[in-house]
Amino acid sequence: MSTMTLLFTLTLLVYLSATVLYLVDMIGKRRVAGRIGRWVLVAGVLLHAGSFAVRHATAGGTPVTSLHESLSFFAWCLVLLFLLLDLRFRLAVMGAFASPLATLLMIGSALSPNVVVELNPMLKTWLFPVHITCAFLGNAAFALSFGAGVMYLIQDRMLKSKRFTGIYQRLPSLDTLDKVNYTCLSVGFPLLTLGIISGAFWGNTVWGSYWSWDPKETWALITWFLYAALLHGRLTIGWSGRKAAIFAIIGFIFLLFTFLGVNLLLGGQHTFKAFALI
């Protein structure tokens, strides 16, 4: 087994262990499990970074051009942003969302073809890693916003039905979940914007055009407008609570289609296969 494969496998196992610990914390109400899970995730994100470092050296550049690499990088960005968010809000219950999602992404990555090829020279530009990093960190922030939105709706429904048992006792207050939602939106939107802008400049160096209305570009712009509308609504109209939570969920559904659906169904210049042929 190669060093890269070993690090990837260990990362998957660590994320899976963190998932178990966070679920024990949420369902079994054992808070020590959540505290241990936090440190397990820290170990996982470091192992994951080591895996990418080895892959970077092997490919000769930013190794995010295939489905395997993209799912893995998404998982790493998700865990990294969750840990940073956890420093502020100390929400172990969010770990019960972030770590299972990261584990699923890693499983999907493990099931995808894993072939390391030398990066095409046209991808070896500083704009490509900037574009990729901003876009994926933005996606991760919106994923956490989605998780906070789902939890908000669950908590809201339990309050209205006066069911104060079970998971209700582990969920944060509606006000805290709304703050988490807004924080993730405030982080994710500038990152998505930078990802689109840097992608346009990078595309001009590769294809000779800043914008070609490729399916990926079109759906990225649609997703950007959705989140722009949500941010505008929160800042100027006063959207918050249930409406903001629903909008965050809808936005993430569009984002998932932009990330996976376009690549797998619609084709274009931004497919994983196209990146390999650039």
Image (spheres, grey):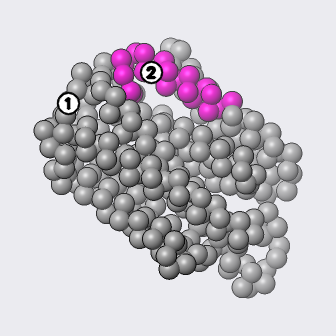
Which residue was labeled with disc 1?
Answer: 278
In the picture of the structure, the residue carrying the numbered disc 2 is: 55
Q: Is residue 276 left or right of residue 13?
A: left
Q: Nearer the viewer, residue 21 or 49?
A: 49
User: Which residues fall within the magenta stretch?
Assistant: 43-63
Q: Between 262 and 203, which is closer to the camera in this rendering?
A: 203
- Between residues 234 and 33, which one lies in front from this camera angle? 234
Residue at 64% across / 38% down in the picture?
Answer: 15
Q: Which residue extends farthest left?
A: 208
Q: Is residue 41 left or right of residue 233?
A: right
Q: Is residue 191 above or below residue 116?
A: below
Residue 69: which disc? none
Judged by its main secondary structure, the magenta piece is: helix
**For residue 217, side relative to residue 231 (left or right):** left
Q: Is residue 272 visible?
A: yes
- Residue at left offset 56%, top offset 22%: 50
> Disc 1 marks which amino acid?
Ile
| Residue 49 forms part of the magenta stretch | yes
The location of residue 150, given as percent across then percent down, is: 60, 67
Label pair 1/2, CB-CB below 8 angstroms: no
Q: Callout 2: helix, strand or loop?
A: helix
Give the secondary structure at mark 1: loop
Callout 2 amino acid: Arg
Q: Residue furthest bottom?
A: 161
Label 2 Cα neighbours within 10 Å, binned few <14 / some 14-19 / many ≥20:
many
Residue at 32% from the left image edge and 55% from the top image edge: 220
| Residue drawn at x 42%, y 15% as measured from the top left | 57
Task: Count neighbours of disc 1 (C-alpha within 10 A) and say few if under 14, some if 14 to 19, many if 20 or more.
Answer: some
